[in-house]
Amino acid sequence: MTTDYPVIIVGAGMAGLTCAVYLKQAGIDALLLEADDAAGGRVRTDVVDGFRLDRGFQILLTAYPEARRLLNYTALDLKGFRSGALIRQPDTDKPNAWISMVNPFQEPTSVFQTLVSPVGTMGDKLRIIELLRKTQELPLDDLFHQTPTTTLAFLRANGFSEQIIDRFFRPFFGGVFLEDALNTSSNFFEFCFRMFFTGGAAVPAQGIGAIPTQLTGRLSPDQLRLNSPVDRLEGRTLTLGNGQTLSADHVILAVDAAQAARLTGHAIPSQQAFTHTTCSYFAAPVSPDNKQLLMLNPHRASAVHNLAVVSDVAPGYAPARQSLISVSTQGLETVNEEALTERIFRELTTWFGEEVSQWRYLRAYHIPQALPAYTPYSVHQPLQLGNNLYQCGDWTAYPSLNAAMQTGRQVAELIIHKEG
């Protein structure tokens, strides 16, 4: 027996949840089918020994227009990082060898400190101000309609020195893009640059997983089915792993490119590739540095690329009198967890001294498909595949939470318009 629904959404990640919430607001109850044991996709939080561990270091950029449009920031109780970074000096044997680069637009008292920091030349800092002005003037959609190049080529063409590229742009935005070559499209770089400098970088007090939890809470309980993988899609009929068949007036594939290709029989986009990262978590009796800034290591051959003391920003991530430290390592296709942990301990001992011996390893998350790669040659994918078939997700546009939510909203609007 086949059960009929107005809309079925395959996948309850951020794109699928966003789509379902907008449909719900228009009076359309969609059924979400999620193969995993919880909603959220990559946006999940686990609790381990009282610590909240996001599945990979993740932050919400509060300037994201889609997030501002849909999420209740007050209910999420957002905790913000300071805008800027601590950058490890090239002399890695020198203890406390840090350069502070703080956003003077958000902390005006730091303007002199930022201008005289050895991260780049005075001209570099003036070019940053000019870049901020330029990215603010263009409407957001127009940023993505420019002729793109790579981020590295863009920075060089705009006169930035190799010094600031290697000491700031590569470790900071390489950490955002999860690729150090800065081959990511310059259009996406300009978008991210604007988001970082005009808004905040924050985490919900109870972990990044609070975001999909908030959206799930806006749906009826019977709209979400977990542990419900879809085996086949034939027209408007879906066959689940347990053999049950469902049909819908509209089917939305809110899954990754490979799953969408499997269900539709279409080829995966030829340019589709992914960046990968490994996030290792450690517990410490005290914070190694309470400046609430992301700590960057320009020496990218190291095991420690970026470090954040998450509990300094959001105390709820750790039990009382404990600190939670997140260490990100990029470029590892496979991970020997024990060897990586030993390398991290060894490197961080040169950063913070023997206090690191009191730290305790908690867990590592190796994420081989962390973000869809987005190069100057990437092409946005269509959201409507047929009369009643749609797809959404960041891989169809550009790699970010904003794109996942944007494409989910756009698909919902297509259906609402059609039904209206």
Image (cartoon, rainbow, N blue to C red):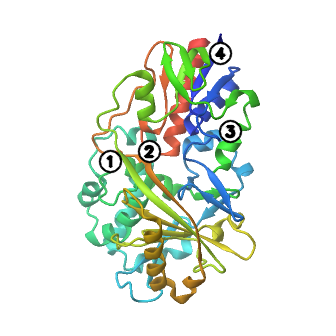
C-alpha separation, residue under disc 2 versus residue under disc 4: 31 Å
Q: Is residue 69 visible?
A: yes
In the rendered view, does 245 fall on the left or right side of 371? Answer: right
Residue 239: give x, y in percent of width and height.
55, 19
Mark 2 or mark 1, which is nearer the start of the sequence?
A: 1
388 and 62: which is toward the camera: 388
Number of numbered callouts drawn: 4
* Label 2 element class: loop
Query: Which residue is at a point 61% across and 44% down the rendered structure image?
Result: 68
Residue 370: give x, y in percent of width and height.
45, 50
Tag 1 and tag 2, C-beta contact below 8 Å:
no
In the rendered view, does 320 fall on the left or right side of 6? Answer: right
Mark 3 or mark 2, which is nearer the start of the sequence?
A: 3
Depicted 400 relative to depicted 88: above or below: above
* Label 4 element class: strand
Mark 4 or mark 3, which is nearer the start of the sequence?
A: 4
What residue is pinned by disc 4? 5
Label 2 Cα crowd, 10 Å radius (few <14 / some 14-19 / many 20+): some
Mark 4 or mark 2, which is nearer the start of the sequence?
A: 4
Q: Is residue 104 visible?
A: no
What residue is pinned by disc 2? 399
Mark 1 or mark 4, which is nearer the start of the sequence?
A: 4
What residue is pinned by disc 3? 215
- The amino acid type of the residue labelled 4 equals Tyr
Tag 3 and tag 4, C-beta contact below 8 Å:
no
Q: Which numbered dot is residue 280? A: none
Q: Viewer-nearest of labels 2 and 4?
A: 4
Label 3 Cα crowd, 10 Å radius (few <14 / some 14-19 / many 20+): some
What is the quadrant of residue 38 in the picture? Answer: top right
